[in-house]
Amino acid sequence: MATILFSFAGSCIQKLQEIITEEAIQIQHVKQELSDLQQTMMQIQCFLKDVDRRRIEDLAVSNWLGELKDAMYDADNIIDLAWFKGSKLLGEQPSSPSRKLTACNGFPLVSCFSTILTRRDIAVQIKSLNKRIERIAELGTKFKFETEPVASVSDMRKTSHLVEPNIVGKEIIHATGTLVGMVLDHREKKAYKIGIVGTGGVGKTTLAQKLYNDHRVKGSFKKQAWICVSQQYSPVGLLKEILRNVRVNQEQGESVGELQAKLAEAIEGNSFFLVLDDLWESDVWTNLLRIPLDAAAQVTTVATTRHDIVAKAIGVEHMHRVELMSEEVGWELLWRSMNISDEKIVHNLRDTGMEIVQNCGGLPLAIRIMASVLATKKTTEREWRKILSSDAWSMSKLPPELSGALYLSYDQLPPNLKQCFVYLALYPEDWVMHRDDLVRLWIAEGFVEKQDNLLMEDIAEDYYYELISRSLLLPDPLHFDQDRCKLHDLIRQLAHHLSREGCFFGDPRLLEDKNISEVRRLSVVTDKDMVVLASVKKQQLRVRTLINPYTFSIIDVLEIFGSSPT
């Protein structure tokens, strides 16, 4: 929580810096109160950096952080409220000089008293909040937190252009050749299925991509399609995606049966190569695709899955298991991914590098991510030893499937990028995210730190490409300018874990079991135009961001039933 609050405090401080001299604030005479709030939050932020660095997990500190989180959410709200109220007051000012004769400080007499009350109300709220946060800051001193200067994103060394994204291990190269041979040897067979099986992050998708993009495979099939299935797949959505791959238009409101018929017609008499990436259930094949695919003259299907039983259930003729990387191959992947060309440096860093690879547990994903982390450091044994000795490797309370290497990659991000990364938890599994959408949303959320003479959009784009360079965002291979991206499912799981106390993704009906007052960002998974939050008091709502990622729009209607009228 300290990491998230540290970043959030930075956003509030930046917001205060931007609005404190605006006319909308001046008119309410609350500049001094907001300046005091800014100073207190800067002190709090320095405390939070030390809490994050020391990874304190004491119960008293956790309670302190919880109280601080509530206060900072209220601070963010009141900052916006002050700006909104001030802007509204400015809009009510008379433009005619003659009207000012019957006005109080430029306001008509009928609204004079309400204007004064508005100013007083905002000032009282800010003063009360200042006292509250000052008390929390005083409690922080009792924990003997140290204060450190806060670095900005612009102070951090970037990884851009340091990591080569197309480097793969020798096993992948060898396996690609083997599987291409199998596909070509069976292209006369009516139907042929290959299963690529292995644990998460081991390189199944990378191998499938190499196979899919091989020029010999492309030249052997009339039509191809790559589909990410995921755990919460939509039958209609999946069929539509296949049809898009084979360039067939769909109409709104078409049923599963109608889409299956369209697919059968599109591939009838043709050879068809299909990849089903991240398959969790055999029903996708047996109930959805088996019959329409039978219309093809020849169809070869490649399915990647974590589970042998799924591959067997769809009837694969060959099952290729992707094993964990050996330390030697992992070490080569590490230094090649960093584009280290000096043999002397490779030799000098070998022992330390091998220890880092061991900590990655043989997972190519973790090794790649560590290469991205190391690319931000000097290429010396001392710097690598610092990374190796980080206690982020042994971070407690992580889900068992998340390795310390994944958390360390997050831990090494500058504050603003941490917020941008955690924000990605609002998107569904295997969702293709658009760069321009993320840029606009990050700016709107206040995550983007101003830099002299640079447009906010350009700075946010730098954030986007930096997350790609750090292997936390995966560019969509179908778009060469990297304007679309996805999250690996393990990386998405990390984002969900980090955001669990402030974000909610899913069916809003499940919010009955979650304290709505703790939710800051709500991503609604529904095809309904009206979202119902049952048994929620309006005063409890602290949701800052409400989106429906499937339509990428604000919900048309948010109705709160069971609310108190006050």
Image (tube, helix red, strand yellow):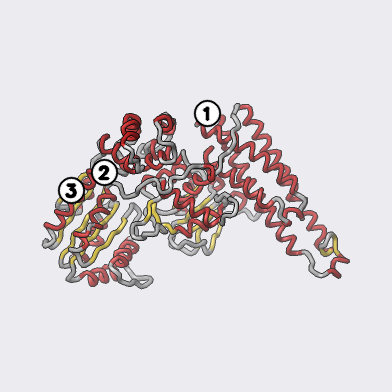
Q: Is residue 131 above or below residue 239?
A: above
Residue 393 placed where, x, y %? 40, 33
Badge 3 local density, few (<14 within 10 Å), some, or many (20+)? some
- Residue for badge 1: 58
Residue type of the residue flagged with mark 3: Met
Q: In this rendering, would 235 be left or right of 442? A: left
Which label lies toward us, 3 or 1? Answer: 3
For the point 18% across and 62% down, the residue is 299
**Residue 40 is drawn in which quadrant?**
top right
Per the model, the C-alpha gap separating discs 3 and 2 is 20 Å
| Left/right of residue 183 with respect to residue 564 in the rendered view | left
**Label 1 with label 2: CB-CB less than 8 Å:** no
Name the kind of residue labelled 2 in the image.
Gly
Which-is-in-front pick, marks 3 and 2?
Answer: 2
The one of 165 and 551 positioned closer to us in this rendering: 165
Question: Residue 144's spot in the image, x, y percent?
Answer: 60, 26
- Mark 2 neighbour class, 10 Å CA radius: few under 14, some 14 to 19, many 20 or more: some
Observer-nearest residue: 513 or 356?
A: 356
Residue at mark 2: 169
- Lower position in the chain sequence, tag 3 or tag 1: 1
Q: Earlier in the sequence, mark 1 or mark 2?
A: 1
Q: Label 1's element?
A: loop
